[in-house]
Amino acid sequence: MTVLFVDVGTRYVTMIDPAGDSRRVDRLTARTTKTWHSTRALHIVSPGEAHEVTAFWDAASGDFLCWYVDLQSPFERRSYGFHSRDHILDVVVTPDCGDARLKDLQELEHAAAVGWFTREMAEEIRREGDRVCQKALRRMRPFCDGWERWKPPAEWTVPDLPTDWLGVGEW
């Protein structure tokens, strides 16, 4: 298992379209850096899993907000860190795991329609989303492991990206 913490102020690299939007996968053409704000996030990645579970807290109050699951290809370690391909579909889970719902089904359909995914792969992504919903509702790992109570050590600081980060890795 790999666990990554992202605090307010963390700079990260993302893909955007010519208008600066990162939501339409068929139009992403450039890399840019952005700064994380408003929430603290703990990303929990299990080897071989086609999803990543994230625990979110409100940065100001410290309240646990929700579990958020990004469906994606399994993480692969690379010289620059990790590589994964986003599968568009997400799952939102209430803090108590009493409700879990799929998010962005229309975007997944659009991605399949424009050839970003085959129809078969889009169906498998949907099935993975359904499996994750059941996993959360049954409070299976990592939803039962107490991560929602985790706190970063007080001495941790926000790291900075190397100046050449936009040219690192593959997209």
Image (spheres, helix red, strand yellow):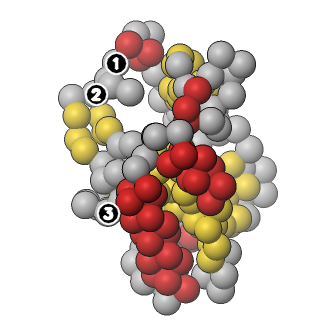
Residue occupying image coordinates x 32% and y 23%: 169
Which residue is painted at 32% across and 63% down in the image?
Answer: 49
The span from disc 2 to disc 1 (Cα, nearest Å) is 7 Å
Query: Helix or strand or loop: what does disc 1 sit on?
Result: loop
Vertical placement of 29 versus 51: above or below? above
Q: Amino acid at mark 2?
A: Tyr
Residue under the image location 60 percent in, 47 percent down: 110
Q: Residue 51 appears at what percent x and percent y?
A: 41, 60
Against 5, residue 157 (above or below) is above
The residue carrying mark 2 is 80
Residue type beneath disc 1: Val
Going by the picture, which residue comes out furthest to the right?
Answer: 61
Q: Earlier in the sequence, mark 3 or mark 1?
A: 3
Task: Please give the residue where the numbered disc 1 appears in the rendered image.
Answer: 168
Q: Are marks 2 and 1 in contact (CB under 8 Å)?
A: yes
Per the rendering, the mark at residue 49 is 3
